[in-house]
């Protein structure tokens, strides 16, 4: 099979067969196909697209390039994936809540890269062990009902190599390539059901509803073609979720949330995702699952489970924050009409709380607090947030924080948090 013929076929709008896609992935991963040919195929896919059957075949080829994680655990075994956003600590709250509801939730998560945070970095700020073998994941889930650990190097190595080339060739934004990249890792675990939290807005990778919906539908459709029970929620990310953004700060907020002191927006997202899994696995309706998750959170029933899990893996469930703090005050009175979440995300990176390149060190203590959101009224001089920092010009940092906010004399509607549900 000649690789250049595959490039030509896709360039001209043809549909690639399962065998052709498998050949392309395997030959490139093995080093038999040069970067320039795979780059040409990726660009052809970027412009011509893949249908969902082709996307499934690409997903399977990348998945089979590495090891699968087959956990010997009783059902229902479930998973959740977020496309990432500012202040997104949902997995840390959701996983112990799902366990309290009777699910087993072995979540694999990633590290921060770019303007959105990574769940693994947040958990690593506690000092806990985050890199677990399949045997250790199984042991932890048996003991606590859930696990959150780093994606292992053995899972989907083809995706890592292809993603690096996508990044270098400006083909990252292709929806079929995003779907196959996410699912080549998520489908590697033998879970029964999976729910996707697809973020949309200024603080997300998907900036428009059209793009977010296309991604959500693709993730659900390809997962179902593979044989999983799958659903998705498209959720608001034009502003940070919860009160804090930053590694240790978000773990501390998660602890408070699990004790029952939870912000309304975080509660709605967590309980809705639990409701989706409740319905997908046949436990009951979406509304029943959401109500049960809310009860678990408000009554603090999952907090001890979370504490014991972190401590079992060597961490402090309420990590210390070693940073200076400066308040951010409203420069005028009126209403907050918009927030640029991406600007705030890059501010966290600038503080040292994120990465511009893979492998960079992170300062776990730095971050931001948000006491006012879109639609809230503020008085001039009122404290609307905080900056936690270790070095830097505090006045300059405050100006950068405020540059993400737009104020209006007229009242503004609060954005709807759950934009769409696909079940």
Image (cartoon, rainbow, N blue to C red):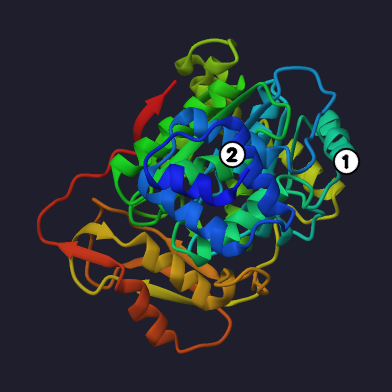
Gap between marks 1 and 2 measured at Cα: 34 Å
Q: Residue at x 36, y 77 (%)?
A: 400
Residue that mark 2 sits on: 21
Residue 63 shows in this picture? yes
Please identify the quarter of the rendering in which residue 216 is found.
top left
Q: Position of residue 116 (x, y in %)?
A: 50, 59
Residue that mark 1 sits on: 136
Residue 92 shows in this picture? no
Q: Position of residue 246 (x, y in %)?
A: 56, 63
Q: Residue furthest left?
A: 410
Q: Residue at x 64, y 32 (%)?
A: 79
Instruction: State the residue in front, 39 or 289.
Output: 39
Q: Which mark is residue 284?
A: none
Q: Position of residue 277 (x, y in %)?
A: 56, 23
Among the two numbered marks 1 and 2 on one chain, the one whose residue lies closer to the N terminus:
2
Question: Which quarter of the figure is the N terminus placed in?
Answer: top right
């Amino acid at each position: 099979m000649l690789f250049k013929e595959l490039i030509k076929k896709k360039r001209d709008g043809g549909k690639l067969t399962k065998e052709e896609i498998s050949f392309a992935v395997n030959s490139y991963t093995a080093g038999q196909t040069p970067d320039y040919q795979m780059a040409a195929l990726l660009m052809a896919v970027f412009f011509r697209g893949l249908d969902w059957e082709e996307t499934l075949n690409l997903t399977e080829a990348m998945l089979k390039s590495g090891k699968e994680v087959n956990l010997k655990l009783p059902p229902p075994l479930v998973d959740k994936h977020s496309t990432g956003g500012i202040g997104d600590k949902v997995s840390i709250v959701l996983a112990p809540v799902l366990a309290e509801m009777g699910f087993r939730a072995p979540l694999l998560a990633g590290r921060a890269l770019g303007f959105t945070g990574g769940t693994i970095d947040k958990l690593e700020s506690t000092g806990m062990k985050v890199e677990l073998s399949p045997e250790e994941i199984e042991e932890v889930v048996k003991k606590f009902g859930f696990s959150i650990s780093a994606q292992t190097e053995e899972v989907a190595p083809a995706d890592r190599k292809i993603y690096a080339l996508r990044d270098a060739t400006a083909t990252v934004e292709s929806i079929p390539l995003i779907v196959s990249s996410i699912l080549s890792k998520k489908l590697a675990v033998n879970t029964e059901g999976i729910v996707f939290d697809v973020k949309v807005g200024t603080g997300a990778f998907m900036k428009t509803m059209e793009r977010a919906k296309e991604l959500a539908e693709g993730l659900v459709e390809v997962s179902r073609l593979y044989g999983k029970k799958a659903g998705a929620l498209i959720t608001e990310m034009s502003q940070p979720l919860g009160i804090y953004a930053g590694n240790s700060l978000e773990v501390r907020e998660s602890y408070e949330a699990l004790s029952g002191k939870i912000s309304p927006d975080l509660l709605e997202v967590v309980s809705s995702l639990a409701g989706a899994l409740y319905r997908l696995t046949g436990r009951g309706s979406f509304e029943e699952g959401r109500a049960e998750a809310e009860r678990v959170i408000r009554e603090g029933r999952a907090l001890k489970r979370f504490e014991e899990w972190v401590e079992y893996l060597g961490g402090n469930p309420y990590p210390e924050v070693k940073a200076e703090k400066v308040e951010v005050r409203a420069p005028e009175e009126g209403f907050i009409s918009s927030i640029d979440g991406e600007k705030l995300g890059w501010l966290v990176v600038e503080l040292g709380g994120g990465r511009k390149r893979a492998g960079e060190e992170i300062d776990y203590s730095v971050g931001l607090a948000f006491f006012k959101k879109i639609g809230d009224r503020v008085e001039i001089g009122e404290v609307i947030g905080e900056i936690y920092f270790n070095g830097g010009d505090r006045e300059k940092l405050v100006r950068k924080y405020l540059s993400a906010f737009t104020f209006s004399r007229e009242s503004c509607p609060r954005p709807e948090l759950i934009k769409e549900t696909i079940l």
